[in-house]
Image: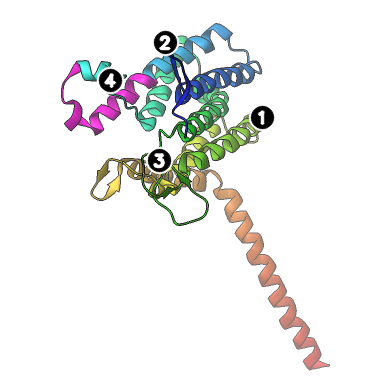
């Protein structure tokens, strides 16, 4: 892995930092491209972007410090000096970002349920770049594996799962799906806010699926913090989707039942006719 991309006597450029910059750049570009389809003002959208980033960073740090309170305590200096005491929570970042944008939407009288559909593709794209940077820099190290598909990290024993790479690729795929869903929502095929529900379901499913391939996580009662939050979110959004698509689900199983029942009835009727003849 390559934690430092450029190492000069007077300057160090870290790989993860470069990919965070790429995440911001390409996420902002996709956000701008998506909102061009709407009547929202560009200045409002980018003001909302920076407000969301500030809120996301604050809550991300706050959640991380709360999870590692034994290392930080009530020391404000440690909270602020992120270079000396690094650490951010991705769930805190996402929750803080959405909460900040929601509050910003209220102040600008922007309908959150409508505007959030245009944010999700950019969010997934940014997450993809962030996870790719975490993989290339070695910021996230997976659990040990005996499978041939693995990677050996410098200073870490054994071959490890490339967990952050798997997650990054899945988030890139999700960005494409969310972008397509955005147009379906515009055609009123799905309700406004549907992309947010898709984000919650997809993100929690990915994090839940790869949780056991990660190391160094904070655990409660034998389960990691991410596992508990992901499981709760997944259950919530599965219930939402079952309720949302209940008509289609009942229609599908009803059609399947009628089809099987019709074949069975036709077979009995055919046998009866043959017997009478």
Is the residue under label 4 in contact with that under label 1 (CB below 8 Å)? no
Q: In the visual, does 55 lie left or right of 74?
A: right
Front residue of 152/83: it is: 152
User: Which is more toward the observer, 184 or 58?
Assistant: 58
Q: Which residue is mark 1?
A: 183
Which label's residue is closer to the chain start, 2 or 1? 2
- The mark found on residue 141 in the picture is 3
Q: Earlier in the sequence, mark 4 or mark 2?
A: 2
| Residue 51 image position (x, y, % from top left) | 42, 13
Q: Tell me the distance, in whole angstroms, between the alpha carbons under discs 1 and 4.
A: 44 Å
Q: Which residue is mark 2?
A: 10
Residue at the location (42% across, 13% down)? Answer: 9
Quadrant in which residue 4 is drawn: top left
Label 4 CA crowd tier, 10 Å (few <14, some 14–19, many 20+): few
- Closer-to-camera residue (143/244): 143
Q: Earlier in the sequence, mark 1 or mark 4?
A: 4
The answer to the question of whether label 2 and label 1 lie on touching residues, with beta carbons closer than 8 A, is no
Q: Which residue is mark 4?
A: 84
């Amino acid at each position: 892995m390559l934690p430092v991309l450029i190492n000069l006597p007077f300057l160090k450029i870290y790989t993860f930092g470069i990919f965070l910059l790429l995440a911001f750049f390409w996420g902002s570009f996709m956000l701008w491209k998506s909102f061009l389809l709407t009547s929202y003002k560009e200045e409002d959208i980018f003001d909302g972007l920076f407000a969301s980033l500030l809120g996301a960073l604050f809550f991300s740090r706050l959640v991380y410090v709360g999870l590692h309170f034994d290392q930080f305590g009530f020391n404000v200096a440690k909270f602020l000096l992120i270079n000396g005491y690094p650490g951010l929570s991705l769930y805190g970042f996402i929750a803080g970002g959405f909460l900040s944008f929601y509050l910003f939407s209220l102040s600008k009288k922007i309908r959150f349920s409508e505007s959030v559909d245009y944010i999700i593709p950019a969010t997934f794209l940014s997450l993809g770049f962030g996870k790719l940077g975490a993989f290339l820099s070695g910021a996230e190290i997976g659990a040990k594996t005996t499978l041939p598909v693995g990677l050996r990290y410098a200073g870490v024993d054994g071959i490890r799962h490339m967990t952050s790479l798997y997650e990054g690729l899945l988030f890139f795929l999700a960005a494409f799906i969310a972008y397509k869903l955005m147009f379906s929502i515009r055609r009123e095929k799905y309700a406004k806010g549907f992309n947010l529900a898709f984000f919650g379901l997809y993100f929690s499913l990915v994090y839940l699926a790869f949780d056991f391939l990660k190391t160094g996580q904070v655990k409660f009662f034998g389960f990691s913090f991410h596992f508990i939050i992901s499981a709760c979110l997944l259950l919530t959004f599965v219930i939402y989707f079952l309720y949302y698509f209940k008509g289609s689900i009942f229609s599908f199983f009803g059609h399947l039942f009628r089809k099987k029942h019709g074949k069975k009835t036709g077979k009995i009727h055919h046998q009866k006719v043959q017997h009478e003849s």
